[in-house]
Image: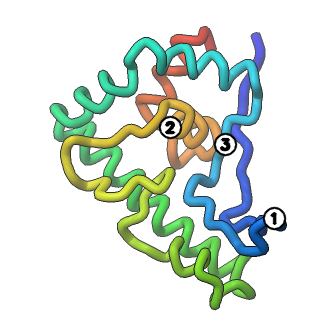
Amino acid sequence: MKRYKAEEVNLIQFDKKKNLWIPQPTRFWILNKDLHKKISRLEEKGLIKKWENKISKDNELFKFFINLHKLEVKKRKRLLEEKYRNLKEEKAFKILLDDNLGIGSIRDFDKKPFKVKCLHLWTAYHLGDKDFENPIGEFVMKEIGQ
């Protein structure tokens, strides 16, 4: 059985064409094409909406995901200070300091209806960092036979 993983990307990346620094509020990405395709097939079945409804209706689950967003805000700030201090004056750095910018640039993450955005995002975090293991990522991996 193949063991998938998510790749951690730089929080701030330089775009040579635009000649500017671009913020990346999603630290983990699914780069494996096979896994990406399998997750896309699940999204085509309407599972994003189903998860949004499920999380919005279940207060415990809703709080769980809010706490993941808050944890990401803390981790992102720490990483900015540790790794990107030299870019403090850049707009990209300042954007990523926003407490309202959750995982995957989801805003208002503490309001209902809950926004899942995509299954790839939650699966990437589930695979990328033990602190971010979550029911969506667990469900996706189970559905694809992992």
Give coordinates of residue 9: x percent, y percent.
72, 54
Q: Name the residue at 26% across, 34% down.
A: 55
Which comes sooner in the sequence, label 3 or label 1?
1
Q: Name the residue at 59% across, 81% down.
A: 91
Nearest to viewer (mark 3 / mark 1): 1
Q: CA distance from mark 3 to mark 1?
A: 22 Å
Q: Name the residue at 71% across, 78% down.
A: 84
Q: Compare residues 76 and 15 and report the one nearer the observer.
A: 15
Residue labelled with disc 1: 17
| Number of the label disc, if any, that sits on residue 29 | 3
Give the color scheme: rainbow, by chain, secondary structure or one colour. Answer: rainbow
Query: Are the two marked residues, 1 and 2, in contact with CB atoms closer than 8 angstroms?
Result: no
Residue labelled with disc 2: 122
Q: Amino acid at mark 1?
A: Lys
Give coordinates of residue 129: x percent, y percent.
61, 46
Q: Compare residues 88 and 75 and report the one nearer the observer.
A: 88
Disc 3 crowd, CA 10 A, few/some/many (<14, 14-19, 20+): many
Q: Is residue 28 left or right of residue 13?
A: left
Which comes sooner in the sequence, label 1 or label 2?
1
Q: Amino acid at mark 2?
A: Trp
Q: Is residue 83 left or right of residue 70?
A: right
Q: Amino acid at mark 3?
A: Trp
